[in-house]
Image (cartoon, grey):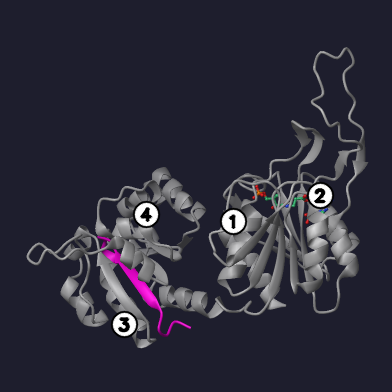
Amino acid sequence: MIKGKHIVLGICGGIAAYKTASLVRLFVKAGAEVQVIMTPAAKEFITPVTMSALTGKPVVSEFFTANTGEWHSHVDLGLWADVMVIAPATASSIAKMANGVADNMLITSYLSSKAPVFIAPAMDLDMMAHPSTTRNIEMLRSYGNRIIDPAVGELASHLVGKGRMAEPDEIFNTINDYFSRREDLAGKKMLITAGPTYEKIDPVRFIGNYSTGKMGYAIADEAATRGADVTIVSGQVNIKPTSDNVKVIKVESAREMLAECQKLFPKSDIGIMCAAVADYTPTEYVNHKIKREKEEIPVIKLTKNPDIAASLGAQKKPGQLLMGFALETDNEDFNAIDKLKRKNLDYIVLNSLRDSGAGFGTDTNKISIFDVNGNKRCFPLKSKREVATDIIDTIISR
Ligand code: PMT
């Protein structure tokens, strides 16, 4: 619930700034504490006096107050916030946030905030449609920020198109939903596999794949934010969970991943198999570097790896939920449903390498989720964090 939460509201210089007075009223009436930060341009559209009267707190806009010398710490504000809302977010502030141009109090606070950030863009339709704005918004999404899409309607220019800031009640409901969902996995133990497996050939070579762990770690962060006790069994990746409540067990091979999952799954309520597990491993490991000078070209014989998802599916108890992923390049639906059945999963998340922006390494993904009754839900291309929200919402809906 929103009651008692700390909300930092960043207001940029656009005509929609006048609507933030209503937004603040909604937050305050619901029991939140609101701290407003205004960019210098925002003060041309709505006065700091109005905002401080509504919030009961002085508005922060400059780094220090000239007459008293008082210093306003952007770091403190970033740490105080349970959530940061930037509304209206103008093209210029969006560009600064995307590129780290920290030339005012709002952008420095944004850059030092550890809280989730919700951004409500507002601008004229052509600015909104410009490739630079589109790219900057996508960059912000890829950092895990959530975008509250602008509406289509009449704009300050009297032109009609996409660019109207979402209405205050829509922004309020988004934030309220976010806080209501926060604890919906409280008390649940979750096991997530992520990243690639490496199957050793010799001390310097392995068979691997392109998985970076981004998708699995995003699910772990989302689940932890919503109260779950999360353990990731992870292949070798270069990322860390952003949430402190996620435990990571690093492994290399499919067999090591299986061994850790076998220990954890019996104590878990939910398992999500997001790792890209090698299906085959070299039959034997050569314990010295295979030399190039050899006349003969070496032949690497392979043997099947255990199927981790299938082995957990076989031991699944009533009350446990198991979700798998299917990464496909063709016959996507057929293959995903086949894996769902063969591995005794409750859900399978399909991502296809035929969709641009989906799959390995990207900050975005495009998924469909199948359940055991053959129902399919398709989602558009989103940031991996937003995809993680859809995945967790699907699990919660059961
Ligand atoms: O890590 P990123 O760079 O963000 O990329 C994300 C991703 C593309 C790796 C992810 O979204 C994804 O699709 N993960 C599953 C990749 C995969 O191996 O899919 P699959 O169709 O081969 O496997 C089907 C399911 O069985 C998966 O849940 C997989 O984890 C599991 N499996 C597969 C083989 C095996 N030996 N053991 C398994 O548990």
Q: Is residue 288 visible?
A: yes
Sequence-wise first label, 2 or 4: 4
Sequence-wise first label, 1 or 2: 2
The numbered dot on residue 75 is none
Residue denoted by label 3:
25
**Furthest residue in direction left, as rendered:** 67
The numbered dot on residue 125 is 4
Is 177 above or below relative to 308?
below
Alpha carbon of mark 2 to alpha carbon of mark 4: how far? 50 Å
Please report the bounds of the magenta region as a residue range. 1-16
The amino acid on which the numbered mark 2 sits, given as a three-letter code, is Ala
Residue denoted by label 1:
384
Alpha carbon of mark 2 to alpha carbon of mark 3: how far? 54 Å
Beta carbon of the mark 2 residue lies under 8 A of ligand 1:
yes
Residue 56, picture quadrant: bottom left
Alpha carbon of mark 4 to alpha carbon of mark 1: how far? 27 Å
Q: Secondary structure at mark 4?
A: helix
Q: Nearer the viewer, mark 2 or mark 3?
A: 2
Quadrant of the rendering where the C terminus is positioned: bottom right
Alpha carbon of mark 1 to alpha carbon of mark 3: how far? 33 Å
Q: Nearer the viewer, residue 268 or 167?
A: 268
Q: Are marks 4 and 3 in contact (CB under 8 Å)?
A: no
